[in-house]
Every structure is written in C-alpha cells, then in structure tokens.
Image (tube, helix red, strand yellow):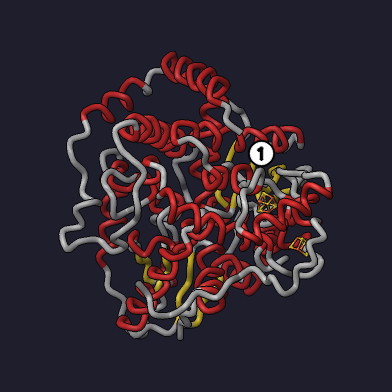
Amino acid sequence: MSKVKRIPGFRKDLCNLCGDCLNLCPVLKLPIEVAKKEVKNLIEGKESEYALYKCTTCLSCNLYCPERANPYQLILERWNDLYKERGAPPLYRFVCPTMESNIWQLLNVFLSNQERRWIYKWMHYVPKPNDTPLLIGNYTHLFPFIIGGSQLLDYFKPIDRIDQWEGGAYLYQGGYLDIVQRIAQRTKNDFDSWGIKNIVTCLDAVEFIFKEVHPKEMGVNHSQNFINFNQWVLDKINSGELNLKKQLNLSVTIHDNCYSKALEGPYWENPRKIIKKCGCRIIEMKHNKQDSLCCGFGSGASWVKNISIIFDIITEGMKKFKEAEETGAKALISYCGGCIYLLWATKELLRSKIEIFHVIEIVRMALGEKMNYPRDHISRAWDIIAIMTYSLILSFFNKNFYIQQITYDKDLSTFKPKKYRLLKTIRYVMDFPLMKNLFAKVFHLLRLLLKSK
Ligand code: SF4
Ligand code: SF4
C-alpha cells in the first residue's frame, strides 16, 4: 500500500451537473435529464445505469465538459471502487504480465527467431546515465517487426520492460487506479536507479501517463524529461535528417486513439503532419479527433460478463471499420500500438479489405525501408486471435482476481513460455484459409448470441 494519497482527477468542485458530458458522449448519447441524473449518481457513488457498463473510455467527455471537471476520471474512480468490490474478470489475466498465462508469455510460442533476438536485446539492456532510452512498450512488443531493424532505432537505446505496464496506461483506462499508483512509484524507482535524464516513449499514452497522470493524480513526480516520439520524428523529417525518399501517394483515414484527446491537439495533429509529409492524402472518418470512437479495447473496461468481453471489444471495433470503409480510403492508419493489434484482429475476423498501417510503417516505407507487409501482420493477427480464443477457454476455469504482484519474479516465470499444446493446435488449424473463414463465421454467431450491452 502506497503512503502517498491519490489526488482525484475529477473536479467535483467545478461540476455543475449540467449533464453535457454524457449527453454529448458519442457512445452513450443520454437524453439530457438522464445524463444529469447519471452524473449525480456517479458523484454520490449510487447505482450507475449507463456509464459504468457502457463507457468505452474514449475520453471525449473531458473535452465536452464546459467546466473542465474531467468527468472521465469520475468514471475511472467508480470503476476503481467496483474493482475493490468484485476484482478483475478472469480474462483480464490476458493483459497482466505478472499473471499466468498472459499475452506476452503466450506469444513467445509464435515469435520468429529475428523477433526473439530483438526482444531479448530490448528486455535485457540496462540503460546508462547518458542513454536516451526508447520505451518499446507492451503493445509494440506484440509486433516488434513494425520498428525492429529500422534506422529510427539508431538514435536511441530501445528497452522493453513489460512489467512496467506501459506506466499503467491501460490499467488507468480500466479504472485500476490504486495499481497505477504502485506502478508510478515502481517506474520512478527504475528511472532514478538508471540515472537517465531523457526518455522517449513509443506511445503518446505512456508519455501522458508519466507527464500528467503520475504527478497530478498519483502523487509521483518523475525527474526525467519525456520526449514525444511523433514530435521527434516530425522534427527529424523537417530538418532533413530523416530523408524521405518516396512519396507514397496513398489515400488514408486516421484512427485517433482514446489518449490522443488528452492534450486536445498535439497528439492527433503530429501524426497527421507526418503522414502528409510521406505523401498520403487524408480522408477523415465521421468521428475523428475529439469525437473519435475507440478501437474497441476500452469496451472491456465496462465489462459485465467475463464471457462477453472479447465479443464486446470486437463489436465496438466494427463501428470503426464501418466508418473507415465509408471514407473510401485505401488504408486505415493508427498511431497507437495498443489499437493496432486489435484493429488487425478485427480486420481478419471481418475479412475487411482495408489496409492497416502503424504510422511508423508509413514513415519506414517513405524512408525506403523494406518490410514484410502485410504477411507479418496477417500472421500475427491470427496468433492474437488464437491467443484470445485460448485465453477465453482458460478463463472458464478461473475466478475474478486481484492484481497482487506488479513486478516480475527473478526468473521472469510469467514471461517464459510453457508447452501450450491446445494453443498450438488452435493456431495450427487457423492456418488453413477455409478454417479462417469458418472461425470468423462462428465468432460472429457467438458475438450475436452473447451481445450483452
Ligand atoms: S469516456 Fe467516452 S464513452 Fe466514456 S462516457 Fe466519456 S465520452 Fe462516453
Ligand atoms: S462533468 Fe462537466 S459536463 Fe459533466 S455534468 Fe459536470 S460540469 Fe457538466
């Protein structure tokens, strides 16, 4: 238990109960009187009928609130209360690196030798005081080929500490606030012990967590300077140090992730500037920037039944695909590694034709770097689908739980793979095109049957 008290992100003193936040919410769209009552109930800790069971953590309500009271953080606070009461659902082990069997441990079964080499190096390097580490992060770890071997890494020391939990970014999104505070303190200890001055994060979300959430809500101040990766890329392109050899001449639409709204501008503008520099024409989706919809991941935060979580996530992601396809763009671009692995899994399950790129891949193509696109992504998407299926089956035998350990043990036992015969069989079967189609159909039938929200 931390001695430092958390500071509530929701500003009760500023809220006038106008209800705009949940009325304008692109997901809930509550009638104004219902929205007022729901906010009041949330503040008073009374039964919530909507927000706690339908919110997709998109963060837009903070931008809609005229008083800047941070209603999103009010929802997080109530989810934190719910976690204390009922624990996390069994399926959430999936994203807990210190629990058996999590996605990083399971993915070890499918990594290529090249990926293993990259990851081993990134996981074991201990930064020296004059290094500028680039935090690869838990989600980029899932598809290291998007950045591995690129000249973009030559400027940094890439490091990959999965049990730093992306600074707590995805736990924060699910309202696990007390755990985030422990992670804030733990990452501070790591950074200080390395003696580093500058840190670059692959994800905007992680930068935001370190710079804003840890000091303002968790009471933990980092003494390092955090550099935004997209800003860094943009500066290097503008200065000519990154020499874009090719104009890609591609029509694209952009997926704005939930955290991109946190600073109301820079996080969603910089990737657009980069993408345009690479010769892409942007066609915006109906919901974009401050109004953008979640990739689906956030839907898991408002879980009702463990069994429905994956189906709810994919259902939410389908809305994004519908909007992306309606633009007529050739490709959908994400600048968040957390979103992209879900978007690829959803694309494969929907059998959608739209291409998906990470913004890093767009830059690499413009730099003239060779990548094994889309083969690596398709294969990884089915690895992830197999892991999700396997985790869902495992979850039937587990109960709700509380996250106790936040740090790996000395043997990294919850990272090292085991035999996983069932997982390998599921993945083997998914290599046949006919089985992929059949699986996608069965998945959608189950999705319709289990629709919970
Ligand atoms: S975070 Fe998004 S989905 Fe949740 S209440 Fe706010 S606007 Fe609605
Ligand atoms: S949080 Fe903001 S938008 Fe929501 S009810 Fe309070 S003042 Fe209104």
* 410 or 92, nearer to the observer: 92
* 72 or 211, nearer to the observer: 72
- Residue 240 placed where, x, y %? 61, 71
Q: Secondary structure at mark 1?
A: helix
Please tell me in which quadrant of the rendered image residue 19 appears: bottom right
Q: Residue at x 39, y 80 (%)?
A: 3
Task: Please state if 96 lies on the left or on the right of 333 as rendered.
Answer: left
Q: Residue at x 60, y 49 (%)?
A: 334
Amino acid carrying label 1: it is Lys
Q: Residue at x 32, y 24 (%)?
A: 426
- Residue 386 placed where, x, y %? 37, 31
Task: Please state if 305 lies on the left or on the right of 21 as rendered.
Answer: left
- Residue 381 placed where, x, y %? 44, 35
The image shows residue 130, relative to residue 178, as above or below, that is below
Residue labelled with disc 1:
320
Please tell me in which quadrant of the rendered image residue 356 appears: top right
The image shows residue 351, relative to residue 258, as above or below, that is above
Q: Quadrant of ligand 2?
A: bottom right
